[in-house]
Amino acid sequence: MDIEPLGNWIPISHQPFIISGPCSAETEQQVMETALGLAAIPQVKVFRAGIWKPRTRPGAFEGVGTQGLKWLQRVKKETGLLVTVEVANPRHVEEALDHGIDILWIGARTVVNPFAVQEIAEAIAGHDIPVLVKNPLNPDLKAWMGALERLNQMGITRLIAVHRGFSFFNRTPYRNAPMWEIPIELKRLAPNLPIIIDPSHICGNRELIPATIQKALDLEMNGLMIESHINPAKALTDKNQQVTPAQLTEIISKLILRRETGGVEFEAKLETLRSEIDKLDEELIDILARRMNVVQEIGTYKKANKITILQLKRWNQLTRERIEAGIKMGLSREFILKLLESVHEEGIQRQIDVMNSDEP
């Protein structure tokens, strides 16, 4: 993708780069009080507010609509902050452009629909405006990249990906599971694309936000999109995940900003350790290949004796024993389980291939 560097179009003089504002624009007073509080924070460069709110069920607060855009015009005039809103269809795009909105964003519910993204991309085409693209609700990297690519093909080069976590059936402390491996893979596939995180939607709970932000910065994410409300307790939407401007200031003050590279001595030591990892990885791959050869031999033996592939009792026992051994060696249960499941899935497929082969 052809992406313009973030620093070319947003003056980033303080780190981390932050977009902040209420989940929803509720009243002009609420918007202005929040904006004035945020404008005093040097890291906040963009004010965000939901004008049209996509709700799961009808009857909930669905935003103030077009009148809220006038409030954002006032924010821009009186604070100097750039302003951004979510758009879900071409009409939203048109109204936002008419009111001088600086940046648009496409939400998670819209990103999952290629037809909607294409219509929005076509409506934006020809306008000199940046676009933020949140990840889809489900952990689907292709859908996320597809939305970014559709916009990029329309000549939109000022793009930012926003990681807001993913819906996941397993219960976790988070509202939306971070699944850091997905934004990391996006960074690998599109190294020029800025990626910022939305800790409000990842956490769903303001108490979890500071640690989540620190982890994101340690993973070299490029900034934050965090919800801030002058009085979260009275917010009409997502009150538990919003922070006050004062709380945001405190969170920022406690962040540790690490460098991406070190001096000559540091780099030499790091290279030594990486070389050790390279050797261990080679050994690990060799061991896995040898393991799969044994699995294939087991599959041949089962086929010859007309035995089924899946031995559930054996799998349950193996999983339990390997997890216990891994924990004793300082590995997490989740890591061992993921590793075992991947190895087991490959082993099952190897045995299926043996069963389906013409060889006796």
Image: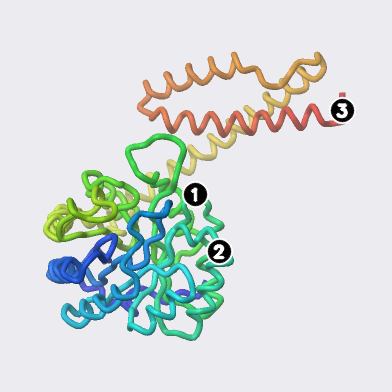
Q: Secondary structure at mark 1?
A: loop
Amino acid at the residue labelled 2: Gly
- Does the rendering let one see residue 18? no
Please give the name of the residue rendered at 69% of the width and 32% of the height, measured from the top-left corner.
349
List the residue tagged with mark 3: 359
> Which residue is disc 1 drawn over?
138
Q: Is residue 301 left or right of residue 212?
A: right
Q: Earlier in the sequence, mark 1 or mark 3?
A: 1
Residue 208 point in image, percent of width and height: 25, 44
Residue density around tag 3, few if under 14, some if 14–19, many if 20 or more, within 10 Å: few
In this rendered view, identify the residue nearer to me: 113 or 143.
113
Which of the 4 image quadrants contains residue 104?
Answer: bottom left
Q: Amino acid at mark 1?
A: Asn
In the rendered structure, the answer to whether residue 116 lies left or right of residue 223 reads: right
Whole-number angstrom distance, CA of label 2 to CA of label 1: 14 Å
**Residue 92 percent across, percent down from the top left:** 42, 74
Disc 2 secondary structure class: helix
Crowdedness near tag 2: few (<14), some (14–19) or many (≥20) residues, C-alpha within 10 Å: some
Contact, mark 2 vs mark 1 (Cβ under 8 Å):
no
Q: Which residue is mark 2?
A: 146
Residue 283, quarter of picture: top right
